[in-house]
Image: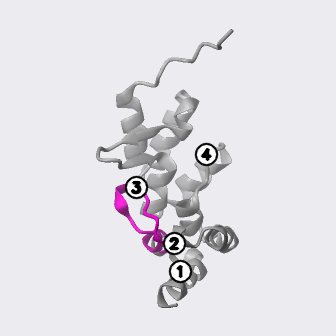
Amino acid sequence: MAQERPPALPLELVNEFVRVAHGDFAKVKALLEETPALLNATWDWGAGDFETALGAAAHTGSRDIAHHLIDKGARIDLFAAAMLGKLDVVKAILTAFPDARNSRGAHGIPLVVHAQQGGEEAQAVLEYLQSLAEA
């Protein structure tokens, strides 16, 4: 017997959650507390441009939001790892999948930009990615 799926999240709510994850930490926390299922929800901006709240935080350098989402169980990816300065994670992924260095995140934003957005904490990741581009 097949399990019944829960109802889809309201599109307006998913859109709001992803939008505020670009920098409004208080609103992210409030929405996630109200609706925990938003954690890994994805908004389709069109033309294959899908974005999660973690993806939004990753390309805007919103470290506090990213850490909060990951602590709550969000699926971490290469882009968030780069912004957060997780050099060991980035190296492991790019060693296993070298062409992933050319991957683009939400809105077509390159991996290196995510590292730039991470600031000082992501400097080692930025230097590593730049060294790959020079090779």
Camera-nearest residue between 89 and 32 = 89
Q: Nearer the viewer, mark 1 or mark 4?
A: 1
Q: Residue at x 48, y 47 (%)?
A: 53
Tag on residue 101? 2
Q: Position of residue 94 (x, y in %)?
A: 61, 71
Q: Secondary structure at mark 2?
A: helix
The vertical placement of 121 against 52, above or below, is below
Would residue 107 be counted in the magenta stretch?
A: yes
Q: Quadrant of the N terminus?
A: top right
Query: Who comes first in sequence, dot 3 or dot 4?
Result: 4
Location of mark 4 (residue): 74
The answer for how far apart the CA atoms under marks 4 and 2 are is: 22 Å
The answer for how far apart the CA atoms under marks 1 and 4 are is: 24 Å
Q: Residue at x 53, y 67 (%)?
A: 100
Location of mark 1 (residue): 129
Q: Position of residue 71 (x, y in %)?
A: 67, 48
Secondary structure, magenta segment, majority class: helix
Give left or right: position of 49 versus 27.
left
The vertical placement of 132 against 95, above or below, is below
The answer for how far apart the CA atoms under marks 3 and 4 are is: 16 Å
Query: Who comes first in sequence, dot 4 or dot 2?
Result: 4
Residue type at mark 2: give it: Arg
Extent of the magenta region: 101-115
CB-based contact (under 8 Å), mark 1 and mark 2: yes
Q: Residue furthest left?
A: 47
